Every structure is written in C-alpha cells, then in structure tokens.
Image (cartoon, rainbow, N blue to C red):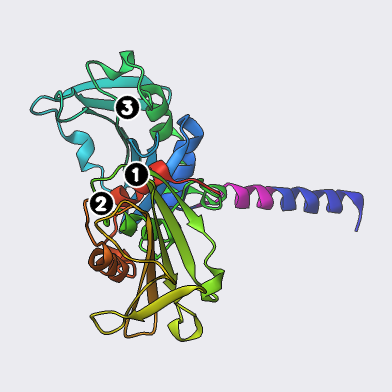
Amino acid sequence: MNRVVAASALATLVLVAGCEDDERVPATPEALAAVALEHADVEPTLVEGSSEGGDVRASIRFDEGQQLLSVGAQDDGTEADEGCEGRGTCAVVETDAGDVGLYWEDEEPEEDPGIVVVTFATGDGLNIAYYAGDRVTGDPRDLDLGVDVDEMVAIVTDERFGTSTTREMTEVDVPGWAEDPGGLTPRTIAHELTLLHQTVHKLAAYEVDASAYGDGSIGATLELDDDITLTGYHVPDADQADLCPTGWVCEPGAEDGVLTGKPRGQVNDFAGTSPLRLLVAVVDGDGHASVVVREGPTLAGYDPTESMVRVAGLIPDHARIDADDLAEIGAIWDER
C-alpha cells in the first residue's frame, strides 16, 4: 500500500470513528440527568427517572432531598403552545439556540414555595426543566435559587439534551442514581424502621454489615433521639442463618413464623427506665427472614414488640416505597 492510499484509508477511519462518537441514540433518563448535572451546580441526594414511549424524564433531588430539579424531553411539543393561566407568569428568554419559554408561579406562604419551568421546542419535540425548592417571590431571573434560570436554560438548549442524545452521555455514571428504585436495599430497610417510632426525631441512618446472617443479607441502622437505635436485616435464606444471636434467648412469637428474643438474663420491665435490647424475626412463606433489633429505653411503659413484628413484616414490601420516602432517608443517610 502506497502512502497516498494509506493516508486516505487513515482519513476514512478517523471520519468513521468521529461519526461513531457523534452518533445520536435514544435518550435515557440517566443521560438527561447527566446533561442536567453538567449545568446545575448541585450535589444530588437521589436521582431517578422514567421512560415511556416518547417521554423521557429524570428527577434530581438535592439539598438533603429538600429541593427538586426535574428534567424531561418528549416527542410531542404541544405543551409549548399552551399559554399562561391562573396566577402563573410567562416570559421569553432569547438564546443563540432559539427562544426559551419561561413560566413561574409565586409562592403561597406556608403552603407552596412556587415553581419555575422552562421549555424549549426543538425539531424533535419539547425539552422541559422544572425547579421547586427555594421560595419564588417574583421574577426567578432576579432570585438566588438552588438552580437558577440560566442553568435551566442551558440544560434544555444543550444539543445533547432531548429525545435523542450522544452515546457518550448514555454511558455516564450519574451520582446518586437509584439503580433499582423499587429494589430492596439498606435504604428501603431504613425507611421501614422509621415507622416504628414515627414521632421520635431521626438523627442518622446507615448501612451495616449483615454477613453474619449469610450470603446476600443486607442491613441498615436508624439512630433516633432518646438513645434509641433500630437495626433491620433482610435474610434471603432463613434456614441457613442463626436468627437468634449468641448470648440471646429466643422463643416463638404469638404468630406463625415469628421469633422474639432478648439477651440472656435481661428482664423486660417496660415500665422501668433501664434500656432494653429486643429482637423479632419474621420468616415468610418463601423462606426469607426479616429481623428488627431495638436498643434503648422504652417509651412511657410501651412494649414495642408487636410494632416491631409489624415493621419486620413490611421490610420485604419495598414496592410501595416511593421517591419521597427515599429522599427523606437520603437526607439523613451516612456513608460509613
């Protein structure tokens, strides 16, 4: 091969490689979130998304879950033609990419902090960004918000944002992304533990080592005021696990599949002031076990065993836990 042919072949290879790098592919929720996080200066607490038909969306919770940036792209641009109604206000932001629609609703004191929405119509559909968190008290372009209007405009006009994007953006590892929002995780276990003492202030939640219960076991601890600690575990194979810790005495509970326990020698005086350590384990029909351990003083002479059984039974029911529940846990989650 002579130099001219070789050079021509190399040039062709470079062009093909460049085309592959710029190849447009269907957008994913992760890709939209990745583009948004390049423009918005936030540290996500939880990122989730959905894709249905021609509608792709991602929600980014930040500021310990107290603020929300939601972004999306849809192949139907009819919303771009809708006018302002009610108490909302509309404006147009001129950009090099074209006009961007700006809409906002002012706060309703003690009820609603207000919202800010920007929309950008493209040849493929409509790009949208929605913000809620800080109080909207007027034109959002003049306010110091968690995500400002300029950042939102930059998101919806980014060439990589839309119903299609670059392959590179679909491969970005998005911080805070919930790989399986409906899956059973230490965070979902921590959420269930919050139901045991709902009126007691929650201090921290974190993952704990569950290897003592066998392969695949996971656990989480929730620390509360009043020196109360709750720990929950999911045990995939109850038959292969010792559900009663060494040094504890356990016995069958009032219901089938329930085990209750306490340290050997402990007297369960629920009317006293001494801290108690209590355990319940619930084994379901599939051979999975859920374990809840409570350590700390009793509250007003209350025996928490029945409530612990109820919470343990809820641990496998992760499908009912939504993004708001996980955001509340994310706000106190501590990586240890």
Residue at (32%, 27%) from the top-left corner? 100
Residue at (22%, 55%) from the top-left corner? 301
x, y percent for residue 190 = 38, 56
287 or 61, which lies in front? 287
Of the numbered discs 3 and 1, the one sitting upstream in the chain is: 3
Kindly state the secondary structure of the residue where label 3 is placed. strand
Which stretch is magenta? 15-24
Q: Residues within 10 Å of mark 2 (few under 14, many from 20)?
A: some
Q: Residue furthest top?
A: 142
Quadrant of the image occupied by residue 112: top left
Kindly report the distance in space between the C-alpha atoms of the residues bearing marks 3 and 1: 52 Å
Question: Can residue 161 be seen here?
Answer: no
Q: Are marks 1 and 2 in contact (CB under 8 Å)?
A: yes
261 or 173, which lies in front? 261
Quadrant of the image occupied by residue 61: top left
Is residue 20 part of the magenta span, yes or no? yes
Q: Amino acid at mark 2?
A: Leu
> Label 3: which residue?
100
Q: Are marks 3 and 2 in contact (CB under 8 Å)?
A: no
Left or right relative to 218: residue 229: left
28 or 246, which lies in front? 246
> Label 1: which residue?
226
Nearer to us: label 3 or label 2? 2
Kindly state the secondary structure of the residue where label 1 is placed. loop
| Above or below for 158 versus 242 | above
Left or right relative to 76: residue 203: right
> Label 2: which residue?
299
| Above or below for 246 versus 77 | below
x, y percent for residue 295 = 39, 57
